[in-house]
Image: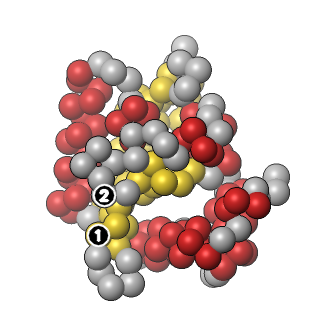
């Protein structure tokens, strides 16, 4: 599973470096056993067995990254996923959206959580239950808040 050419850029490298470094700060452990930089980091994240997504800081945050595992799980291509408001990854049921909003607020206030569970939905309408996901704030090298990311290792389809 080769990394698409459009992901091989310094902007993506910088973003993923922020994701990985913010993860390490929040959880006091590395995302990967080895340290990677530049295009090698992009490749490792893209090919990881876990789903990794991130969004920015807009009032209605838009996803700005998903690795191949996440794209497969959400049944979308990269362009579609990265134009999606993150709230649309949850079902339109009010309770699910309320839980999602509470999650984002908790992460904003605490910096990170490692036990998120909830229902998400793919582009094709497949519902899946996520367990023990990690969600954390992204901060750049200057300490500025630049978004949030989530790492999902456990999920099961429930349809």
Q: Residue furthest top?
A: 159
Which residue is drawn at the image coordinates 67% and 62% (left, top)? 7
The reply to whether the C-beta atoms of the residues labelled 1 and 2 are less than 8 Å apart is yes
Q: Which residue is mark 2?
A: 57
Q: Is residue 74 above or below residue 12?
A: above
Task: Please provide percent x and percent y for residue 135.
Answer: 38, 54
Which residue is drawn at the image coordinates 23% and 21% (left, top)? 94
Distance from Cα at disc 1 to Cα at disc 2: 8 Å
Q: Residue furthest right?
A: 2
Determine which of the numbered discs, if any, sits on residue 145 in the image: 1
Toward the viewer: 30 or 21? 21
| Secondary structure at numbered mark 2 | loop
Q: Is residue 92 left or right of residue 69?
A: left
Toward the viewer: 2 or 107? 2
Query: Label 1: few (<14), some or many (≥20) within 10 Å?
Result: some
Which residue is drawn at the image coordinates 82% and 57% (left, top)? 2
Res 28 quadrant in image: bottom left
Task: Please provide percent x and percent y for residue 140.
Answer: 38, 77
């Amino acid at each position: 599973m080769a990394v698409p050419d459009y992901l091989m850029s310094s902007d993506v490298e910088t973003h993923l470096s922020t994701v990985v470094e913010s993860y390490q700060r929040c959880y006091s452990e590395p995302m990967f056993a080895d340290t990677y930089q530049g295009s090698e980091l992009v490749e490792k994240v893209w090919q990881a067995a876990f789903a990794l997504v991130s969004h920015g800081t807009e009032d209605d945050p838009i996803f700005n990254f998903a690795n191949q595992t996440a794209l497969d799980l959400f049944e979308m291509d990269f362009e579609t996923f990265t134009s999606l408001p993150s709230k649309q990854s949850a079902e339109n049921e009010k309770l699910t959206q309320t839980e999602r909003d509470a999650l984002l607020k908790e992460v904003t206030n605490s910096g990170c959580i490692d036990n998120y569970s909830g229902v998400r939905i793919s582009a094709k309408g497949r519902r899946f239950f996520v367990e023990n996901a990690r969600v954390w704030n992204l901060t750049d090298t200057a300490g500025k808040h630049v978004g949030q990311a989530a790492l999902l290792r456990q999920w099961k389809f429930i349809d």
